């Protein structure tokens, strides 16, 4: 434990951090609310464990997720966000080596993980099957530079990308057994 009192630099850094955090929350929550408005497997009321924004330092992820509707699986989720080092987080499949944005369908429960693994052969490019520490996913990536050229366009680009893939996600989820 540190025995030093906070100084001017610490207070200045916290002001920047809090403002940045509020902007990040608004950005990712906007995407989360968009997901909640989609039809098919996306349509589900808010679950307690969902996160519109989560920082996962160890996996180098800035992401959010919402649970999907499926009659046989309760823990199936749709994730979205930024992977700061995708090749160290996601194993197997076609994983980029540079910072990327991603969308995915994943699971943490053993039974649902088995269902996703069994469906891996059905996955078509640009989607790929991958595993991470603690969960399994079908994921697709795009270079982060495409989405952050103009920061104000991040949310509209993510929403459009999700919309373009919503039917593929609905189809994939409907085939899980």
Image: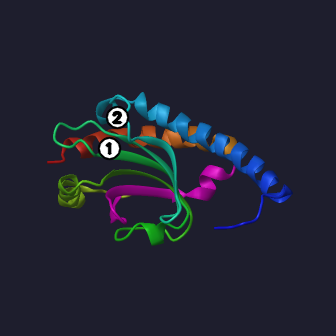
Q: Residues within 10 Å of mark 1 (few under 14, many from 20)?
A: some
Q: Is residue 152 above or below residue 37?
A: below
Return the x and y of residue 176 as percentages of the image width and height. Answer: 18, 47
Q: Which quarter of the rendering shows the N terminus?
A: bottom right
Q: Residue 52 carries which label?
A: none
Q: What stretch is highlighted in magenta?
A: 128-150
Q: Is mark 1 on a helix, strand or loop?
A: helix
The dot on residue 169 is 1
Cα separation between marks 1 and 2: 9 Å
Can you name the residue that lies furthest to the left here? Answer: 177
Residue 143 is a magenta residue: yes
Q: Write the residue at 37% across / 70% down.
A: 91
Q: Residue at x 33, y 30 (%)?
A: 43
Residue annotated with mark 2: 42
In the rendered image, residue 115, in percent from the top left (x then y), is placed at: 18, 54
Q: Can residue 2 be seen in this view?
A: yes
The mark lying in front, picked from 1 and 2, is 2
């Amino acid at each position: 434990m540190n025995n030093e009192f906070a100084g001017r630099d610490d207070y200045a850094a916290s002001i920047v951090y809090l403002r940045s955090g509020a902007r990040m929350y608004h950005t990712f929550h906007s995407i989360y609310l968009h997901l909640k408005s989609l039809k098919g497997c996306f349509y589900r009321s808010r679950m307690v464990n969902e996160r519109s924004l989560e920082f996962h330092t160890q996996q180098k992820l800035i992401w959010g997720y919402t649970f999907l509707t499926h009659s046989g699986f309760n823990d199936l989720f749709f994730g979205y966000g930024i992977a700061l080092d995708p090749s160290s987080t996601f194993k197997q499949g076609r994983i980029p080596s540079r910072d990327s944005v991603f969308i995915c369908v994943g699971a943490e429960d053993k039974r649902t993980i088995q269902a996703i693994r069994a469906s891996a052969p059905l996955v078509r490019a640009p989607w790929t099957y991958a595993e991470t520490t603690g969960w399994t996913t079908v994921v697709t990536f795009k270079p982060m530079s495409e989405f952050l050229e103009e920061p104000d366009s991040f949310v509209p680009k993510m929403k459009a990308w999700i919309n373009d893939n919503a039917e593929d996600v609905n189809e994939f989820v409907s085939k899980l057994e």
